[in-house]
Image (cartoon, grey):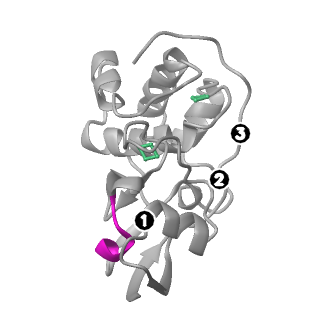
Amino acid sequence: MTRISLTVDGESVADDVEPRMLLVQYLREKLGKTGTVIGCDTSNCGACTVHLDGTSVKSCNVLAVAVDGSEVTTIEGLAKDGQLHPVQEAFRECHGLQCGFCTPGMIMQSVDLLKENPHPSEQEIRLGLEGNLCRCTGYHNIVKAVQYAAEHGGSGRTEQAPAEVTAGAPQEQGGHV
Ligand code: FES
Ligand code: FES
């Protein structure tokens, strides 16, 4: 076992973890942060995306021991004072989800995308989200949600205090990102 100390969603945590434990397993199984989900075993789907020191990473592709001393933000740390992050609000407003399974990763990736490029074109959004798969194929409204977020304050906020993301209404079908 290896001792790690880090900050997750604004709270300091310390645990003994097995060297083989993945960050996504640590978040879900040790910290109970099940908003970060596992959608594949090939590092392809992006459902497990979190922010590591402010940059999006696939947490199934990172060992827990590797994040010792780091700051991690999950989907559960985006909202602040009971208010959804603007990107969460945009996904709700634009119905950017169907089953919602890909949504935490899509939102975390979108927040990072907008931080890097506050006013992305549709093509830049599709390229920025190409590492995140939506098995419901709801890409059309996901892209609309990121565009909406860019126009409504989603480019300015990144790290927030802990809170739960909420589900929204079903969306229309769309094409590939
Ligand atoms: Fe991490 Fe699919 S669970 S990329
Ligand atoms: Fe169902 Fe994306 S996988 S909304």
Q: Which residue is mark 3?
A: 167
Residue at 68%, 30% in the rendered image:
99
Q: CA distance from mark 2 to mark 1?
A: 27 Å
Return the x and y of residue 131 as percentages of the image width and height.
34, 34
Residue 139 in the image: above or below residue 66: above
Q: Quadrant of the C terminus?
A: top left
Return the x and y of residue 77 as percentages of the image width and height.
54, 61
The one of 64 and 96 positioned closer to us in this rendering: 64
Q: Which residue is mark 2?
A: 83
Q: Please report whichever mark, 3 or 2, sits nearer to the chain's N-terminal start.
A: 2
Q: CA distance from mark 3 to mark 1?
A: 24 Å
Q: Element type at marker 2? A: loop
The one of 90 and 151 positioned closer to us in this rendering: 90
- Residue 49: which numbered mark, if any? none
Residue 160 seen by the camera: no
Q: Which residues are magenta?
A: 62-67
The one of 78 and 152 positioned closer to us in this rendering: 78
Labels 2, 1: front one: 1
Q: Which residue is mark 1?
A: 23
- Few, some or many residues within 10 Å of mark 3 (<14, 14–19, 20+): some
Q: Check mark 1 vs ligand 1: CB closer than 8 Å? yes or no.
A: no
